[in-house]
Image (cartoon, rainbow, N blue to C red):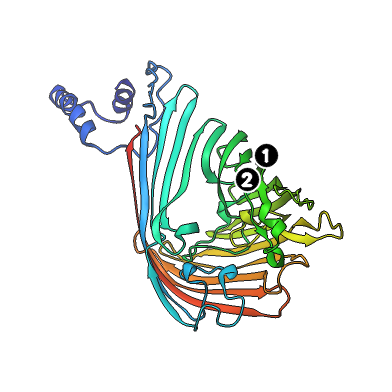
Amino acid sequence: MRYAMHHEERGRPRASPWLLAAALLLAPLARAQSPAPTQQPPPPSETSAPEPAETSKEEPEGPKVEVYGFAMLDLGYDFGQNDPAWYDVVRPTKLPSFENEFGTDGRYYAGVRQSRFGVKTYLPTGLGELKTIFEFELFGVGVDAGQTTFRLRHAWGELGPIGAGQTWSPFMDPDVFPNSIEYWGPTGMVFFRNVQLRITPWQTESGSRFAIAFEKPGSSQDLTNYADRLELSDVSARFPAPDISGQLRLASGMGHVQLAGILRRINWDDRGTDPVDLTGGTWGWGVNLSGNLKVAQHVLRLQGVYGKAIENYMNDAPVDVAVEPQADPLKPLTGEPIPVLGLVAFLDLAWTKQVSSSIGYSYINMENTDSQAPDSFHRGHYALANILFSPVPSVMLGPELQWGRRQNFRDGFSVDDWRIQFSAKYSFKTTIGGK
């Protein structure tokens, strides 16, 4: 007040005592009703007393629960044919291996199997924030293939650098998945949620990290023409150690680059009593280089992976190990790890806040062994293009054109599958607790 009075005395005539008294009485009311200034006030004069500094005590973050998910309708028309258990996805491995294996071309389909429900929790502890996630969807696989049934996606807990449960494998980069409505995704992508114990000794707020995991092992074998041999009936797979995977991700505002690797051991034991001994084992390994590049509001998604006996980590590939004959009569067969190459290249385009598109291609190639059947899966192609609309943030709908192609090993057969799909997705999310 003293600063203002000094300037008033110099530049204006002195006001009457009654006007001064009225101004003093009305000043608090005027300050309460006037809007906050948009600029910083002038600095106080050197003669004015300093004002005490304000101390802000931010309320600590409390326990928090986040419930989220979406209901999603998929309907479309398949101009070709595929395995009926996989009627609503594009999987080159599930396309026919010979002419009209699954009947006549042309099928309409509809379903809600992509619908999802999840719960995340955040609990402050003396060692940091404890995070958990439980997430389910309705897409049946395995014995439930083709069914609309609950399927566990994530069951995961994480405290500091230690995480345990089921979630994305570190060998995978989930950010490579395009903004598409086809459920299964690029055929050549590493895509696997696995049971694991994971250690992340280094991570930053920008998303850079180094992680290593001990994952649940597993594999599949191709016995082809040797499947009916008596000796093979006594052979069983054994995994003496976990699959060891790791990733190094470097992230910035322009995107990220990730290098991941995996090493695994696969054994098989001959439990028979005959002289033939088929006991053996092999190593599996893989290297996966992936990343995103942000160009304005658009995102380029890339991945290249190569390895042996890692097919069960791939999004759409058959077997890890194939039987190979040998000259030794007491050990006539052995297992051969199958090399695999996978490529992914997609561009997500954000035309406006309400309109987006995705276009891209994916490829997978198996280096089949000589003992595999001529109609074994050899090569797969996958591509799509869409235009999606979001009239409000929680709603997404639109059409998508999809293509898949299968090529057999060495019988000359190949087949294309074209589809048109329309989906409508209605999302929800609410947070309970926190500050």
Residue for badge 2: 217
Q: For residue 215, what is the image quadrant? A: top right
Residue occupying the far right of the picture: 327
On the question of residue 327 being in view, the answer is yes
Q: Is mark 2 on a helix, strand or loop?
A: loop
Q: What residue type is labelled 2?
A: Pro
* Above or below: residue 128 compared with residue 334: above
Q: Where is residue 322 in the image (x, y as percent from the top left)?
A: 72, 60
Q: What element carries label 1?
A: loop
Q: Where is residue 132 in the image (x, y as percent from the top left)?
A: 45, 37
- Judging depth in this view, the residue of 157 and 349 nearest the camera is 157
- Judging depth in this view, the residue of 330 and 398 nearest the camera is 330
On the question of residue 394 being in view, the answer is no
* Above or below: residue 82 compared with residue 206: below
Q: Earlier in the sequence, mark 2 or mark 1?
A: 2
Left or right, 408 with reference to 278: left
Q: Do the residues labelled 2 and 1 touch (CB within 8 Å)?
A: yes
Q: What residue type is labelled 1?
A: Ala
Residue for badge 1: 241
Q: What is the C-alpha distance between the residues marked 2 and 1?
A: 8 Å
* Above or below: residue 272 compared with residue 385: above
